[in-house]
Image: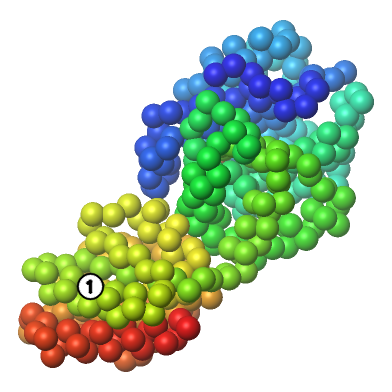
């Protein structure tokens, strides 16, 4: 991809990773991008780099616009490899560039790359004049790492928040008004649910703080995916909704099954809930993508987890799912569990222990069935589903 102009003398010079299908553990079925931006002013400034495998593409894009040796500043909003790992290559041609990062960013860069680079640290509210433009910095620890920060182009009113407001979406288009709305929001929700959800309270505070700092962007240019230019409030408002744990009349069942008993239970529970007009999604854990499940859970009011008992506990896939989801700490939901067993149980007990340990609101009693659910037991499953539906309503 070639460079794209965001505003006069402000360019996207990043790379599109069409082939990426897994980003540190979650599936990226639509690939991703590593967005870097070049600002040509009295001082030529590069904001972020790209994953090291695309460093020649970054250089090519810069060269289309200016002599790469002329770069004066390199702003590193975030040190994670997908954004900083072309820095050694960039420093080979931009030998005199000064790097701008947070204090944590500087430490991380020195530890990652061990180079004696000229790194200036900045903190929230600091500004850098690069000519007719001003860069204003806002520290954003844990969005996504302790070193993260946002860079705001004051005169252009463009916010470059790195990981925040991104999506893993490879596209030949760069702007929100050029891609299908439902695809864009689907990927934005999936990205939030799997990467930023644990930091919900920090996101709410950061959005408030941006306003207090006079950061009112007309364009939001994240470091992954599409740039929000037609309506940047759309993604900010969605982040507020997600971060506050606001939910819809929606439920998600996640289950695994050994010989089909737990599956029969799951279908009976689903049938009862669906009768109430509740949007319900069902995932067989071994056949499903965990990051897609998280996207559906994001706005669900109820999450219902089912497992057969194996070796006195839950199925390993359900255990892994609970480990993942309790780390992401979704808010504002009710949780329920069910399962089947042969002789001694244990799956439901252990699911409930995990949910309680995570501080989730557990709907009790849970439902357990011995061996195969007959019609009487399936009726109990429907009644169990009815109880959950009433809670959702
Ligand atoms: Fe896109 Fe936290 O890296």
For the point 66% across and 10% down, which residue is it? 63
For disc 1, the marked residue is 267
Residue 121 visible in the displayed image: no
Front position in the image: 372 or 181: 181
Q: Is 360 situated left or right of 225 in this image?
A: left
Q: Position of residue 38 (x, y in %)?
A: 72, 23
Q: Position of residue 324 (x, y in %)?
A: 39, 61
Label 1 crowd (10 A; few <14 / some 14-19 / many >=20): some
Q: Position of residue 309 (x, y in %)?
A: 16, 75
Q: Is 119 situated left or right of 78 in this image?
A: right
- Secondary element under disc 1, as helix, strand or loop, is helix
Residue 61 in the image: above or below residue 129? above
Most distant residue in the right direction: 132
Front position in the image: 108 or 298: 298
Please, which colouring scheme is shown?
Answer: rainbow
Q: Quadrant of residue 280?
A: bottom left
Residue 309 in the image: above or below residue 48? below
For the point 90% across and 23% down, which residue is it? 131
Front position in the image: 340 or 55: 340
Residue 218 in the image: above or below residue 48? below
Q: Quadrant of residue 388?
A: bottom left
Q: Position of residue 215 (x, y in %)?
A: 82, 48
Count of labels in the image: 1
Is the C-beta of the residue carrying label 1 under 8 Å from the nearest atom of ligand 1? no
Q: Is 297 situated left or right of 230 in this image?
A: left
Q: Is 326 situated left or right of 182 in this image?
A: left
Q: Quadrant of residue 197?
A: bottom right
Residue 220 in the image: above or below residue 327? above
For the point 83% across and 34% down, which residue is it? 156
User: In the picture, which quadrant includes the N terminus?
Assistant: top right
Residue 48 visible in the displayed image: yes
């Amino acid at each position: 991809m070639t460079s794209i102009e965001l505003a006069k003398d402000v360019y996207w010079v990043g790379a599109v990773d069409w082939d990426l299908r897994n980003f540190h553990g979650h599936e990226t079925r639509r690939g991703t991008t590593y967005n870097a931006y070049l600002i040509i002013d009295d001082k030529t400034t590069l904001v972020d780099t790209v994953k090291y495998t695309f460093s020649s593409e970054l250089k090519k894009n810069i060269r289309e616009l200016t002599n790469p040796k002329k770069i004066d500043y390199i702003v590193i909003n975030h040190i994670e490899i997908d954004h900083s790992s072309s820095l050694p290559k960039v420093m080979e041609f931009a030998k005199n560039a000064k790097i701008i990062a947070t204090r944590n960013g500087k430490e991380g860069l020195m530890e990652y790359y061990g180079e004696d680079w000229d790194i200036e640290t900045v903190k929230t509210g600091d500004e850098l004049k690069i000519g007719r433009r001003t860069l204003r910095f806002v520290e954003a620890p844990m969005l996504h790492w302790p070193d993260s920060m946002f860079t705001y182009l004051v005169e252009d009113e463009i916010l470059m928040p790195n990981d925040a407001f991104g999506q893993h979406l490879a596209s030949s288009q760069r702007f929100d008004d050029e891609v299908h709305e439902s695809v864009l929001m689907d990927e934005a929700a999936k990205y939030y649910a799997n990467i930023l959800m644990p930091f919900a309270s920090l996101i709410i505070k950061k959005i408030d703080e941006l306003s207090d700092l006079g950061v009112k962007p007309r364009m939001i240019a994240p470091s992954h995916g599409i740039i929000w230019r037609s309506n940047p409030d759309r993604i900010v408002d969605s982040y507020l909704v997600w971060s506050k744990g606001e939910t819809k009349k929606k439920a998600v069942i996640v289950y695994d099954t050994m010989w089909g008993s737990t599956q029969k239970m799951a279908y009976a529970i689903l049938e009862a809930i669906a009768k109430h007009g509740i949007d319900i999604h069902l995932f067989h854990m071994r056949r499903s993508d965990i990051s897609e499940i998280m996207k559906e859970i994001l706005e669900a009011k109820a999450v219902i987890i089912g497992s057969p008992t194996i070796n006195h506990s839950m199925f390993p896939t359900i255990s892994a799912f609970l480990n993942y989801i309790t780390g992401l700490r979704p808010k504002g939901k009710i949780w329920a569990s069910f399962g089947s067993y042969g002789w001694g149980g244990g799956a439901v007990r252990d699911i409930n222990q995990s949910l309680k340990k995570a501080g989730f609101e557990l709907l009790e009693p849970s439902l357990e069935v011995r061996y195969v659910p007959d019609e009487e037991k399936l009726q109990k499953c429907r009644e169990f589903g009815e109880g959950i539906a009433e809670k959702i309503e």
